[in-house]
Every structure is written in C-alpha cells, then in structure tokens.
Image: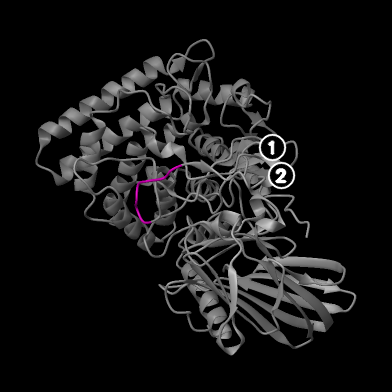
Amino acid sequence: MEWKAETIEGHAMLSDCETAALVYEDGTIDWLCLPRFDSPACMAALLGDAENGGWWLRPAGKVLSQQRRYRGETMVLETVYRTSDGEVAVLDFMPVRRGVAPDIVRIIEGRSGRVDLTSRLALRFDDGRTHPLVTNGTDGETIAIAGPNGVALRFDTDIGHRPRCFESMFSIKAGERKALVMSWFDSAGPVPGAIKVDEALAETMEFWTQWSRKSAYQGIAATQVRRSLITLRGLFNETSGAIIAAATSSLPEKPGSTCNWDYRYCWLRDATFTLLAFMGTGHKEEARRWVDWLHRALAGDPIQIQPFYRIDGSRQLLEWEADWLGGFRGAKPVRFGNLAVSQLQLDIYGEVIDTLFVASRTGVVDDAHELVFRLARDLETRWYMPDAGIWESRAKPQHHVYSKAMCWVAFDRAARMMEVHGTDRTTARRWHNLAEHIRHQVLRDGFNDHIGALTQCYGTARLDGAVLRLPLVGFIDAQDERMIATVAAFERRMVDGGYVYRLSPEHNSDTKGFREGAFLAVGCWLADVYVLQGRAADARRIFDTLLAAENDLGLLSEEYSVEERRALGNFPQALSHIALVNTAMTLSSGKPPRLVV
C-alpha cells in the first residue's frame, strides 16, 4: 500500500494526557507512541511510509465529501464521510487513562444509507520497524506482541490477518454502530479487560468539557484560546506533571532539510511559559503539579539543571538517527532523542525562577523559595559563560543577549523572593547588585549602534526574535528608544506579510539553501511589545495573522511557510499555543500576563 501524509497541518491530535496520536485528514492514524509521549512509536508512517505503521479507516468507495471537527471543547474527533451510498461518522478518541493502560477507540456510526468501509492496521514497534507476533486471545480478541509491547484488538467486526497487517471490511447502515478498540499492555503482564466503549466516550467527553469550563478567560478570540488550552492540557502528562514541547519528532523546520529534532520531552523553558498561560486562565492545579515535577527532576546536591528532561524527570537522553525512516516528505535524518540536553542554556534559569516567583506571589505554590535559592546560587557560578542560547545552536557557544537578560531576571526575582522569605539580606543585596551589573553589560554590549538594535549576541549585527521578550519580563521599558529602534529594525528585516522570522534573513537558511519558516511564537512576542508601545492595532493585525496559521481544528505548528502557506516543524507545538494564549490575554488586558504581578 502506498501512502504518505502531504501536509503537517492536515493532522488532528488525540490525547489521553499520557501519550498522543496524530490523525491525518483522510482518517489515517500515522503517528502513535505507546505507552508514553516519549516511548518508541508503534505507528510511524508520518516519518516514513505505510510500511512503518499506521491505521487506515475510511469508506471503501469514493468519498464525495468529508468534514471533521472536535466535538465541543474536547479531544474527541468526529469525521463525517459522504459517499454515493450514504453517510457515516467516525469518532476517534483516547480515553483519559487515570493509571490504566492506553486505548485507541474508533467508533463508526451510520448516518444514512449503507456504506462499505475498510480498516487496515499495520503495527510497527521500535519506531516503525518491528512487526509483532500475532496470536488469538479469548472472546475473539487478537493479541500482538513485540518485546515489552502487547496490544489487544477488540473489533465489532472480523479481523483479517493479512501479510504484515490486520484488515477488516464491513458495512454500516443508518442507525448502526461499530467500535474498533486497540489496547496497549505490558507484554510481561496480563491482558487488560475490554473497556465499555459508550462509558469511555461519555467519560472522555466529560473530562475535557469539565476541564475547559474551569477556564477564567473571557477576552478576545475566546474560542481559539480555549482550543489552545485544551491542546496544552493534552500535552500535559497526567502521571508525572511534566509538559512536553510537542507530540512529534523530526518534522522539519525547513522543507526537506536536516533541521529535524525530537520535541517529545519536557523543556523547562516551554513548560514555564505554559504555566503562565495556565495560571492566567484559572488552571492552577497544573501549575502546582508541574512545580512538584520540577522539584523531583532537579533533586540532587549540588543542583544540576539541564534544558529538558524525560517525562518522568530522568536526565539521560541520547540522540540517534533512524536510518530506516525516510523522513516527512524526504526530510532526513529522522532523529530520536536530542543532543541539546547537554547544552548550557542560561535563559532557563531566568524563566524557571520568574515562573516560580509569579506562582509564589499569586499563591499557586507556597514552597518555591528554597528551589529558587538553589537555582540562583548555581547561576552565580555560570552566568558569565557563553552558552547555546534559546534556539539551541550547535555552533560555538556565544554571549547571547537574551540569555544574559534572563540571568538579570533570575537574580532580580531571586533577590526579591529572598527579601520576603529569607533572613540572608547580604545574599539578597548581592543578587540585586549582580542583576544591575548584568543589565548594564547587556545594554552596553548587546546594542549595535550601526544597525540600531539589540542583537542576538554581543558584538554581532544579527537580529534575534528572542530579544522581543525583554520588555515582557521587565528588563527594558518598551518605550525605551533602544527598544523602539529594535522593533523598527525587525519591521524592516524580519516581518513578511504579518509573519515574523526569528533570525536575520542572512542567517535563516542552511547550507543547502533551505529557508526556515516564520516563527509563530516570535510573532506573538512582537504583538505583545506593540501593546506595550501603545500600538494596539498593529498588535491585533499580527495576532490575526497567527490565527490564520491555525489548521481547521485550531492547531498550530512551530513555524509557517509564508510562501507555501504550510505548517513547518513539530506538531502541535506547545510554544505556539502558549504564545497565542498569552498574547490574547495581553490584547485583552493591555499588559502581558507576566507583568500583572
């Protein structure tokens, strides 16, 4: 069978808050990792072809039209197909697990006439290369085993064993309903019992609906904000409290290029941004649980921070290449793991400490000061070093302007917390003085008089979208002439049709000439600065451009090809949805959420 997804934005996401599946617009599940977000994939056609695993389910005949949507404010996907013989709907969802093994449920409902359908399931464990051993279980179930992975198939139709796949052909007439259920289990343990499909659907609808109703946001683009919050909750690991950056690995940032990275881990930077979005919209429980996860991940003396961690808080993450996968539309290599785990990224100290500061000031957590103290004490031994920067450059470390500014944030917030919670006034005063020293250094060495802008690194002329965040954390006033000049430089060189790039044009292409897409979060940061500069109309224009980059289900990737009007990068991307939520709050209130405190 020949099959490949043509677009990134053609996908929907299903989530049980432990892992996620991607469903392409034709009804194909082409990405699924079990049992966790960061587990090896058992369906990897997204990064290869049909032989690398997927689940195809659709009418056997010609489809005249189809429509899809999420049912209400949930992650239950409904796809309706109309053929010359009738109409059917497919409901795809993952029951929220609450400690039970993961399931994929596909319910087919007959709406009119009689429609023939075909289900073809190809399981390929170990990231798309291992076909399981198949046996027959009890009560008509089919069991597939590969190493530690077990899968039980329970279909309301016959399951045909074809070479290297399971195939079912059946008919649905108006009023009929059939369910196809796939349940994962640890192959060393017992096969889990069958779920009650109708109860699972009702419970899943209730979980997402009730969670969404907790949102306190009532501002502009409320529908899009709620969908982004649901997406972020779908990337939140229910068991550990970790928040992953994206559900996928190795979707290219540049079409056909080698910029393909694994984002299925908990980046401290992205997670802290997510917490600000959750706290600002009334979802405080997730913030508390993430702080608990952070305490566990950073446990150890002396404290040793790294840019990201596995979902369970473990530190070891080797990067390797899967040479049997051809890549999304030929973008190779396909990478799992991420070498950036060993990088020094100084900005994360500021982001984590700032978030703990806000959480403490707002009463979300009450025991953050000791962790802040340990982080700031560690940063005292590192802040002056060159680092890899927010974009995780694999070139020689440099003195990044954004990284240094976030060191200012770290010491400024730590000193203020020390004054409230501690008795060590000497340390608080030292951190205040160090913060002001860093601020003076950044404004002296990070502003290029020739181009009239704050730049990416000391002594360079490169522009970097990260510096747009400096007014948002209080490092520099948005009305300061240096910030006004920086925004003007961005408008001249970094904005295209309302979309904003994160790097200067001359540094935005790789050695093969592939150009990176516009970076959606950076566009939101520019909109936030516009608000602080009194340019609300310009901010709304940029924000509306971001909304135009959503797919039909309200999902965003990391980047966007302005030329092709296509999504780029891993999907759905937490950072883009975080930026959407925070900028909507900025536009609604007139100030960024971070500056509310």
Q: Position of residue 330 (x, y in %)?
A: 70, 42
Give whichever of 44, 381 is nearer the camera: 44
Q: Residues within 10 Å of mark 2 (few under 14, many from 20)?
A: some
State yes or no: discs 1 and 2 in contact (Cβ < 8 Å).
yes
Q: Which residue in the structure is indicated by mark 2?
A: 329
Numbered mark located on residue 535 in the image: none
> Please, is residue 427 above or below residue 224 in the view?
above
Left or right of 215, for residue 14: right
Q: Amino acid under label 2?
A: Arg
Residue located 61% across and 63% down the image: 131
Q: Quadrant of the N terminus?
A: bottom right
**Region of the chain picked out in magenta, as a range:** 312-318
Of all residues, the one furthest to the right in this rendering is 84
Q: Position of residue 116 (x, y in %)?
A: 82, 78
Residue located 66% across and 74% down the image: 91
Q: Secondary structure at mark 1?
A: loop
Dot placed on the residue nearer the N-terminal end, 1 or 2: 1
- How far is the residue under mark 1 from the one under mark 2? 7 Å
Left or right of 37, for residue 570: right
Q: Secondary structure at mark 2?
A: helix
Q: Which residue in the structure is indicated by mark 1?
A: 256
Of all residues, the one furthest to the left in this rendering is 423
Of all residues, the one furthest to the top in this rendering is 450
Query: Magenta stretch: dominant SS?
Result: loop
Residue located 64% across and 39% down the image: 332
Residue 474 visible in the shown view:
no
Give whichever of 355, 107 is nearer the camera: 107
